[in-house]
Amino acid sequence: MRDADFQVAIGDKVSFSKTVSESDVYLFAGITGDLSDVHCNEEFMSKSAFGRRIAHGVLSMGFMSTASTLMYTPHVEKYADFTPVSQGYDRVRFIGPVFFGDTVTVSYTIAKIEPDRNRTLADVAVVNQRGETVASATHIMRWVPDRSREPKIA
């Protein structure tokens, strides 16, 4: 794959902001089955070091995924022979709590292009309204060749 096929460049950046509501956390808890007291029991958490309920760390990863979609979706039709698909996240860290009512902003920045491996890597950071980093990761986007590009078997 040539660099030109990626349609993105090192330094390209998008961001996504979301205020995390109680319903966001409860819907996520219901979907995943993670109904931990940390997320769903205000009385329990009022006695904790946090003093109140916190959102699931993995919910922040969902917001990271939204940011990756914002980066790549505008270019999908330009890719012609490749489909961008998330290959996962490396070095995921949940650095601080996300409280109900916090507004988080995800910054997604293309950090590296690896044409020989058909992938791009992005630095992803989630920051709350107080400017505190609450999560970070490296996102790996793989560029999967369409069937038309696969070798033909005779």
Image (tube, rainbow, N blue to C red):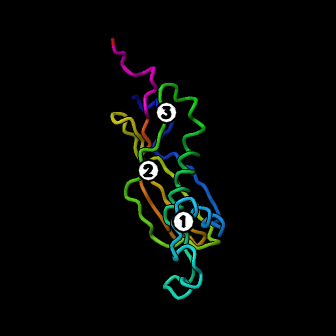
Q: Quadrant of the N terminus?
A: top left
Kind of residue at disc 2: His
Q: Against 114, is 48 above or below?
A: below
**Which residue corresponds to the image point at 52% horizontal and 45% vertical from the top-left?**
12
Query: Where residue 80 sits in the image (x, y, percent)?
Result: 52, 25
**Which residue corresponds to the image point at 40% horizontal and 39% vertical from the top-left?**
119
**Tag 2 secondary structure:** strand
- Residue of label 1: 127
What is the crowding at mark 1: few (fewer than 14 residues within 10 Å), some, or many (at least 20)? many
Q: Is residue 7 left or right of residue 93?
A: right
Q: Against 69, is 93 above or below?
A: below
- Which numbered disc, 1 or 2, marks the residue closer to the eye? 2
- Residue of label 3: 83
**Tag 3 secondary structure:** strand
Q: Is residue 40 left or right of residue 11?
A: right
Query: Where residue 4 sits in the image (x, y, percent)?
Result: 46, 30
Pointer 1 with pointer 2, Cβ within 8 A: no
Query: Observer-nearest residue: 124 or 45?
Result: 45
**Tag 1 secondary structure:** strand
Stretch of the chain drawn in magenta = 144-153
Q: CA distance from mark 2 to mark 3?
A: 16 Å
Q: CA distance from mark 3 to mark 1?
A: 29 Å
Q: Against 147, is 84 above or below?
A: below
Reading the chain from its start, which is encountered first: label 1 or label 2?
1
- Among all residues in the image, which is located at the extreme top? 154
Q: Against 97, is 135 above or below?
A: above
Query: Where residue 64 sits in the image (x, y, percent)?
Result: 52, 55
Rendered image: mark on residue 139: 2
